[in-house]
Amino acid sequence: MARLLRFAELRFPLDPAATFGREGPLVLEIGFGDGRFLVTLARAHPEWNLLGVEAAGASVVRALRRLCREGIEPVRLFKGMAGFVLRNLVPPRALARVYVNFPDPWPKSRHAERRLLQVPFFRLLSTRLADGGALFLTTDHPDYFAFALEEGRRSGLFEVQTLPPPPEVLTTKYAEKWKKRGRRFYHAVFTKVAEAREVFPPLRKEDGMPHAILEGPLPEIRDFEKMVHAFPGGHAIFLERTHRYPEGYYFLVRVEEPELELIQELLLELRPSTHGLYAGLKRFGDPLVTPGVRHAVGFLVDWLAAQGLRVQKRSY
Ligand SMILES: C[S@@+](CC[C@H](N)C(=O)[O-])C[C@H]1O[C@@H](n2cnc3c(N)ncnc32)[C@H](O)[C@@H]1O
């Protein structure tokens, strides 16, 4: 069955044959939305191993339901950002193709940096595509199309060809929506002809749980207000604290690390343990230990120390 990839089971980069349970050309769809196009691709090319990445959680759930309902097997989905997947999950030169259908155009110039298809993206992509591999772009947005063509050419790593869109890309949810409004469609193929010199190493995956052991009685945390802690490379937002059963507290924390293209919602906890009070990450919700997560734990520990607890041991 199609399924969602979780950090706990993943190596960086992933091993495609182990992840899909078979060998096959690896094809990535970026921003798969409701997953319709993944169904189309799987039916047309049953030998392809399809990896999908989508930033919006609600769309991931919808797509997974669709793929399961349709009995589609060779698809693995990841909730997150394209850059994260390319850098950390996709091995060098592993991708046969990449599809991007109707990317968000971000038409305002103050939002231009959010556009997906820019020179740094093309540089990273060139290291993950196999020789002769290609990215297929379809959009209804003429300005975004011109922008993407220019960025692809400017990278110096891709040959760019504009073609009429093939019929299968005009069946996605957004294609249907824009067809009804009579929009024109634009299509381009970016074929890799050279590779960036940078290596773009994936993150090193760590198994240990960042934490500290503190000494002192479990404090009564009464007035908790949202706290934001900035660190180099991002910030951690402490959104809420709740009571833990039978003793202690959970802290709901959002860690945003734009340079890693990663946002995580995590639980930190403060609870009695055999050696003292444990303050650290909880293994719940598939956390990935990153520098930002370690900063968040460090911030919590310092905050608890300021409430009068003594730090015995720091492990983060
Ligand atoms: C306009 S929709 C198109 C959806 C679908 N491809 C279609 O044609 O119906 C763009 C999608 O890309 C997703 N997205 C935007 N930026 C992304 C990124 N950097 N990585 C992964 N998904 C992204 C959005 O969440 C959204 O679902």
Image (tube, helix red, strand yellow):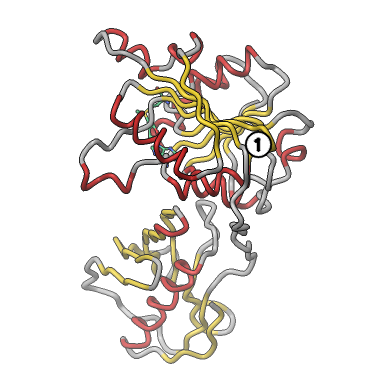
Find residue 84 and report its horizontal and vertical position in percent: 51, 49
Seen from the viewer's position, the closer of residues 298 and 121 is 121
Mark 1, secondary structure of its residue? strand
Residue at 44%, 58% in the rendered image: 266
Ligand 1 rendered quadrant: top left
Find residue 69 and report its horizontal and vertical position in percent: 55, 16
Residue at 68%, 47% in the rendered image: 91
In the picture, measured across the screen, residue 14 lies left or right of residue 174, that is right
Seen from the viewer's position, the closer of residues 14 and 208 is 14
Up-down relation of residue 200 to residue 74 (above or below):
below
Seen from the viewer's position, the closer of residues 63 and 51 is 51
Give the residue pinned by disc 1: 95
Task: Give the quarter of the image for residue 141.
Answer: top left
Task: Give the quarter of the image for residue 249.
Answer: bottom left
Residue at 31%, 86% in the rendered image: 307
Seen from the viewer's position, the closer of residues 300 and 148 is 148
| Amino acid type indicated by mark 1 | Leu
Tell me the quadrant of the picture where the N terminus can be found.
top right
Residue at 56%, 45% in the rendered image: 86
Find residue 232 and report its horizontal and vertical position in percent: 39, 72
Up-down relation of residue 275 to residue 265 (above or below):
below
